């Protein structure tokens, strides 16, 4: 039976909880008499000051929108790094399975289909022999299509580790991305090479990952919908572009963009630029993926763009309506805006570097946990559940709100393991060490109904 994966059950100490708490610290500024006088003066400013105030509002909106698209580009780069790294780990695990060894092709195909059900993100899973001939596949290749090029099969059989290959729509580098293939060689009982297993994710799945990331940001952000994104190869070719702009004729033209050059240099940020192809003013966030080890082809650049006019449109509509109602309604709001902006600058000046570092790290950890394809459960040093990601909800049957605050021992640990689990927690709390830390082990677990099933478990201290 193929077991479910729990990539990380994290036991963190009280000091870690304090660390997370630090990300929530804020500094508040009291409204002094001087501040009241300042607001009173602002309220008394004539209509002639409104254009200046609107310009300040515009600059603020542009800055916020730029920071948002920069963050989205960084999030997409991080997410794609995670997705590709997990696929490399998957193909290594698949290749170790004894169920792929033998001559019973029907049983092997049944097992591959079970794997495909557990990992539905793959387009297909296939086995080839030493000559590259297809043995079995969860999806039969179409006419003129293969599950792996001869060069990929040759490279896979000639190396101990996994091999990764980019497949282009035009059949050669320079075009848009069609899919990414991962392969690893298989050995028989005598450790002789008998062939290779090949997995494949297509560009639609990669686009779905990117789209989910931008939608998640938009759900918690005030700015207009992202209009375009593009994924560029290290040579500047467009591998993937947003659905609003077809891959064949994207307006995100790498040769004309400062953002593409900045991303290629490994920098992160945003730039206000004019695209030479479309002539539109836009804010473009940029970032670069870390890439896979020994695979420079995967240091992709990520560009995320929002139309500059769309950023300003909503605020102009609101502000001019307020002007139509009367200055008496608009000016106090502008005064409050100025005060809020000043308060924000005071907050940022107090321990800004430390706070931003903590918040960024906390956000990254949270996003990694949320998008992980495996179940991720976090507990404190008492064994109380503090985190429970969506995949854990699916595997174990408990919703996050139901299980957080409960003892892990009384939820997913079978009765025969509970004493050993509690003893291990006490040992870790006293020494900071454990025999199963940072290792992958197979063990039984319980779901909400009390059903016991096998899982692969790795425990990582934080």
Image: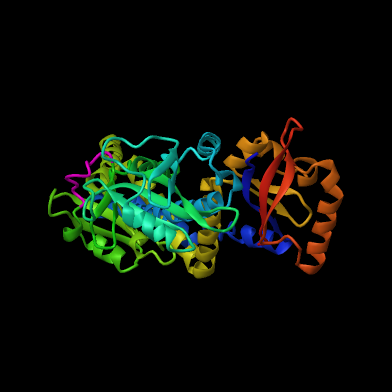
Q: Residue at x 44, y 56 (%)?
A: 81
Segment tinted magenta in the rendering: 243-252
Q: Residue at x 21, y 47 (%)?
A: 170
Q: Position of residue 238 (x, y in %)?
A: 24, 53
Q: Quadrant of the N terminus?
A: top right
Where, by quadrant of the figure, is residue 30 drawn?
bottom right
Q: Is residue 82 above or below residue 140?
A: below
Q: Nearer the viewer, residue 455 or 133?
A: 133
Q: Position of residue 12 (x, y in %)?
A: 70, 59
Q: From the viewer's perspective, tell me whether residue 189 is left or right of residue 34.
A: right
Q: Quadrant of the C terminus?
A: bottom right
Q: Is residue 410 above or below residue 44?
A: above
Furthest toward the top, the residue is 449
Q: Nearer the viewer, residue 64 or 327?
A: 64
Where, by quadrant of the figure, is residue 398 drawn?
top right
Q: Position of residue 268 (x, y in %)?
A: 36, 63
Q: Position of residue 139 (x, y in %)?
A: 40, 35
Where, by quadrant of the figure, is residue 267 drawn?
bottom left
Specify whether residue 96 is painted magenta. Answer: no
Asked if residue 49 shows in the view, the reply is: no
Q: Nearer the viewer, residue 391 or 443?
A: 443
Name the dominant secondary structure of the magenta segment. Answer: loop
Q: Nearer the viewer, residue 226 or 321?
A: 226
Q: Residue at x 52, y 50 (%)?
A: 90
């Amino acid at each position: 039976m193929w077991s479910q994966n729990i990539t990380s059950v994290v036991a963190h100490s009280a000091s870690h909880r304090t660390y997370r708490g630090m990300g929530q610290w804020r500094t508040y500024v009291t409204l002094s008499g001087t501040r009241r006088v300042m607001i009173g003066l602002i309220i008394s400013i004539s209509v002639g000051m409104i254009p200046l105030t609107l310009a300040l509002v515009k600059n603020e909106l542009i800055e916020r929108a730029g920071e948002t698209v920069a963050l989205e580009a960084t999030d997409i780069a991080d997410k794609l790094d995670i997705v590709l790294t997990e696929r490399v780990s998957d193909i290594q695990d698949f290749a170790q399975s004894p169920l792929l060894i033998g001559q019973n092709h029907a049983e092997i195909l049944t097992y591959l289909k079970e794997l495909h059900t557990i990992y539905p993100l793959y387009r297909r899973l296939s086995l080839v022999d030493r000559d590259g001939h297809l043995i079995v596949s969860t999806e039969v290749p179409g006419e003129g299509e293969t599950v792996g090029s001869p060069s990929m099969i040759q490279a896979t059989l000639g190396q101990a580790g996994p091999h990764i290959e980019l497949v282009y729509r035009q059949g050669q580098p320079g075009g848009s991305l069609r899919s990414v293939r991962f392969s690893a060689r298989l050995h028989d009982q005598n450790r002789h090479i008998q062939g290779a297993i090949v997995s494949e994710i297509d560009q639609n799945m990669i686009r779905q990952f990117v789209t989910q990331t931008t939608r998640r940001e938009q759900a918690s952000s005030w700015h207009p919908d992202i209009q375009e994104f593009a994924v560029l190869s290290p040579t500047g070719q467009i591998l993937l572009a947003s659905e609003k702009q077809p891959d064949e004729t994207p307006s995100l033209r790498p040769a004309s963009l400062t953002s593409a050059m900045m991303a290629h240099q490994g920098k992160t940020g945003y730039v206000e630029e004019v695209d030479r192809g479309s002539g539109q003013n836009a804010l473009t966030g940029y970032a670069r993926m870390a890439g896979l080890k020994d695979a420079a082809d995967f240091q992709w650049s990520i560009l995320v763009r929002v139309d500059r006019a769309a950023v300003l449109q909503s605020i102009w509509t609101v502000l001019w309506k307020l002007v139509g109602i009367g200055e008496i309604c608009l000016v106090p709001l502008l005064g409050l805006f100025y005060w809020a902006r000043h308060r924000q600058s005071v907050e940022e000046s107090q321990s800004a570097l430390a706070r931003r570092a903590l918040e960024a790290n906390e956000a990254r950890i949270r996003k990694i946990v949320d998008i992980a394809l495996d179940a991720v459960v976090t507990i404190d040093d008492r064994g109380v559940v503090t985190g429970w990601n969506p995949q854990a909800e699916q595997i174990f049957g408990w919703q996050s709100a139901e299980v957080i605050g409960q003892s892990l021992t009384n939820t997913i640990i079978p009765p025969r393991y509970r004493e050993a689990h509690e003893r291990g927690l006490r040992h870790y709390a006293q020494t900071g060490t454990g025999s199963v830390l940072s290792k992958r082990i197979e063990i039984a677990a319980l779901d909400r109904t009390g059903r016991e099933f096998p899982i692969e478990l790795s425990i990582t201290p934080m």
